[in-house]
Image (spheres, helix red, strand yellow):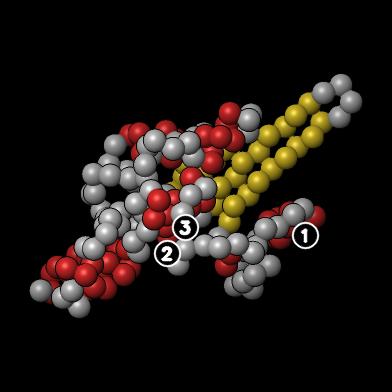
């Protein structure tokens, strides 16, 4: 997951550029020697990094929390997709469906539309916002897509391609 957010403020005295880059913890060279990111490493060295925070153990709950500023259980996005898939694989569908189900392929839902998301708030403050990578916050209708949720551009995929393949494999083996 990579989100790039930037804003340039000009006045008669100086130009100030404030940029935010949200990157997965292990997706940068200064945490993972297998990833080569010299420009991001340089930005991190010269700027401020925020690395100590409370996160969820799975993708959609973590993305939901970051985007809304709320704990996922307050907005119905607390269930891990992988837990759901594993419970189905082990014939425990009743357990897997307790609570709000995760976002699965072709689900007619997504991250709640009644909240202002981080990129929407940043757009209001004059930032440009760009999404690169996995969205996995809903794609059943246009209003759930990144470009409708505050991002100027989006490059990546909307759902969880790995889970989609796992579900197909599980269904085909039963």
- Which disc, if any, is residue 45? 1
Q: Is residue 66 left or right of residue 101?
A: right
Q: Are marks 1 and 2 in contact (CB under 8 Å)?
A: no
Q: Residue at x 46, y 54 (%)?
A: 71
Disc with the residue nearer the chain's start (3 vs 1): 1
Q: Residues within 10 Å of mark 3 (few under 14, many from 20)?
A: some
Q: Nearer the viewer, residue 36 or 100?
A: 100
Instruction: Name the foreground residue: 92 vs 151.
Output: 92
Q: CA distance from mark 3 to mark 1?
A: 25 Å
Cα–Cα span, label 1 and label 2: 28 Å
Q: For mark 2, does the 10 Å Cα neighbourhood hold few (<14), some (14 to 19), or many (20 or more) residues? A: some
Q: Is residue 77 above or below residue 167?
A: above
**Image-based side of 10 in relation to 155, left or right:** right
**SS at mark 1?**
helix
Q: State whether residue 169 appears in this view.
A: no
Tell me where residue 48 appears, x and y as whole percent.
Answer: 74, 54
Q: Nearer the viewer, mark 3 or mark 1?
A: 3
Query: Mark 3 and mark 2 in contact (Cβ < 8 Å)?
Result: yes
Cα separation between marks 2 and 3: 6 Å
Give the number of the disc on residue 58.
2
User: Crowding at label 1, few (<14), some or many (≥20) Cα neighbours within 10 Å?
Assistant: few
Q: Which residue lies under the disc numbered 3? A: 62
Which quadrant would residue 167 be assigned to in this image?
bottom left
Q: Position of residue 19 (x, y in %)?
A: 69, 43
Residue at point 34%, 61% (across, down): 79
């Amino acid at each position: 997951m990579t989100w790039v957010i930037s804003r340039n403020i000009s006045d008669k005295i100086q130009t100030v550029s404030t940029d935010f880059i949200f990157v997965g913890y292990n997706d940068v060279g200064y945490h993972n020697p297998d990833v080569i990111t010299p420009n991001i490493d340089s930005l991190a060295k010269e700027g401020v990094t925020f690395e100590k925070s409370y996160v969820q153990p799975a993708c959609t709950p973590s993305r939901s929390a970051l985007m809304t500023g709320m704990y996922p259980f307050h907005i119905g996005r607390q269930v891990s997709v992988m837990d759901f898939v594993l419970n189905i694989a082990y014939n425990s569908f009743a357990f897997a469906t307790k609570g709000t189900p995760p976002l699965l392929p072709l689900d007619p839902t997504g991250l709640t539309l009644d909240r202002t998301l981080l990129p929407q708030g940043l757009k209001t403050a004059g930032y440009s916002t760009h999404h690169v990578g996995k969205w996995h916050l809903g794609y059943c209708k246009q209003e759930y897509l990144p470009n409708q949720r505050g991002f100027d551009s989006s490059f990546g995929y909307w759902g969880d391609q790995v889970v989609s393949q796992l579900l197909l494999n599980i269904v085909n083996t039963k």
